[in-house]
Amino acid sequence: MTKPYAIERWTPASRLGLTGIAIVVALFGVAPLVLKAGSLDRLTALFIYIMLAAMWNALAGYGGLVSIGQQMFFGLGAYVTIRIADFGLSPFLAIFVAAIIVAAIAWLLSFIMLYLKGGEFAIGMWVLSAFTHLLVNLDGLVQGETGTSLISMNAYAADNRRIAIYLVAMGSMLMLLGILYALLRSKTGAAIQAIRDNEVAATSVGVDVIKTKRKLFVLAAFGIGLAGALWLCTALTFQPKTYFSVQWTAYMIFMVLVGGIGKFEGAILGAVLFFIIETWFGATGVWYLIGLGLAAVIFSLYFPKGIWGAVEQRFGITLLPIGYKLRITGDET
Amino acid sequence: MTSNLLQAVFLGGNYALIAVGLSFMFSVMRIINLAHGSLAVLSSYLLFVLASKFGINPFLGLLIVVPVMAALGWILQRYILDRSARGGELLPVLTTFGLAILLDNLMFQRFGADTRSLAPYIGDLSWDAYELPGGFMVGKLQILTLATVVVIIAALQLFLKKTQLGRSIRATAMDPDTAGLVGIDAKRASAAAAAIALATVALAGAFLGMRVTFEPYSGGMQLLAAFEATVIGGLGSLWGTLLGGIVLAVAQTLGASIHPQGFLLGGHLAFLAILFVRLLRGRAFVSAWLTRARA
């Protein structure tokens, strides 16, 4: 017996999208062979932005947890890397160990922070970030705001190092996007979307809200910690002030709001847009930041679904579907 | 040490002054305004411009800046926050954070990175002190700040209780829809509350500029202090906010006496500890966990 309908998870557009993504990834993979050093560094930055946007989106767009303190995990990722590398571990291993440690810290924090509501959680995280920043300053290795460097990176020749960081950043980005995508398509994903739509209703159908949010909180800390560690690899110097700056969260919010909050593709689009804007206007300094702030205000007021939300609504395109689609076939027997 | 603790109480008055507006706005609109600190710094700059360009004493300048900020609060609520709040409870966080970034950088663009102070424009008040019995010295400015915040809180309480507008603000805070049913214009009440909140922000900015130096990006730290004082005192309670400010300042003073860099750490630690204890008390799972541990 065939049913008069079929359930699909993939659409023609998304199959095309997937092929497109595979091609883009392959192109990025061979880029080190052709691109100059400067361009390669810029692309590494793009990968880190995509990681940041995807992770903030996971937290706010799916978990309903708007945090102004995600720079804490960015700074911690870099700091723990410095600490571990100081013990003699290879920096390329240290970044992953650091990200795992940051995730463990987030797991502990989640038992307090996740019980805070809305704006309280948002600024509570900011306070926590300021607190962590001050604690890191106390470590003799960091020398307060003077900072320190990832000295062990000097063991690698500059060119090889650049390509290695590029590839590790790309791999990290793909890994994070993969984990998030798998999570969203899993059973947890259904719970996550239920929470996003209505927390009370989700609880009533048996979703464990805190447990589900905890997964996103820890994943976001892991991803942003990894991003911070990678940023350290490219920048080499660690000044607590630059890593624990609230500006990082401002960037994340801009990328996700403009791209499309709660949309998997939206965060990526937002990061790419941010990257282009930064490349063109970053040199204008303060006007560029004024523009970012203004964009955040305007998008939150008038286009809360962001660019990708508008595209999806208008054209019905989904490149990376996480839901289910019902197709009526009509051949009832 | 006693002298230090006494200073801390007065410092707490400063924190309470900046926190009052945040707490008031939260209790009425359920919005935590992340641009709160930046708006206070904006007030400091406005007073600075009036003093340095036109020779207007900052206290006289308040006659201009308080109404300006109140009007700004009205506009902010009417055209930005009201719209933002309709999109859910998370959107105002994003809108007001965007606003803070916008304001901070506009101030940087206009006034540059130099730190400023209002102290040169208030004569001896910036350094004059009274000697209290027991030989303790307390700055006149500090006493004036604490007195101001006490007067503001008392006036706000009286206003909320006794006046028509105050009652409609309280009704809106409880339930805007039901307030509408009994003929209260909830939008007008919210806008009035925002205007009042920003009028207190103007005063907070004035005392901030007289007490310490400020620069375009000082707003973030002010917001954190205001938020900490508000939460320590219990969100939405005005007298609690005063207590919260004092607890915050005492914790900072104790922190500083333990470690040279302990001033801010002490304050944050007090905030986190109080948050933790409150959650422990409020959580059902803890009692369940405790009974299991006892069994």
Image: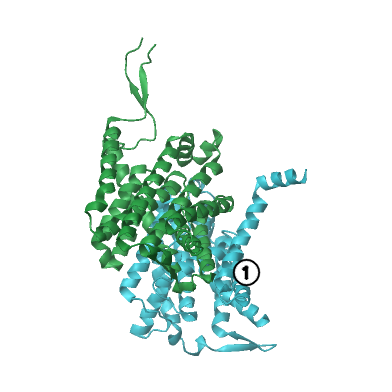
Chain colours: A green, B cyan
Chain letter of disc 1 in the image: B
Check the picture and name the quadrant holding the C terminus of chain B.
top right
Residue drawn 49% across and 70% down?
A142
- Taking depth in this image into account, of A99 and A126 the one nearest to the observer is A99
Can residue A133 be seen in the rendering of this structure? yes
Residue named by callout 1: B247
Outermost residue on the top side: it is A333
> Given the image, on which type of amino acid does mark 1 rest?
Val
Residue placed most toward the observer, A211 or A66: A211
Identify which residue, A207 or A82, lies in the foreground. Answer: A82
Is residue B143 left or right of B104 when viewed as pictured? Answer: right
Residue for point 46% across, 54% down = A67
Q: Residue at x 35, y 71 (%)?
A: B107
Where is A194 relative to B148, above or below? Answer: above
Image quarter for residue A328? top left
**Residue A303 visible in the current orientation:** no
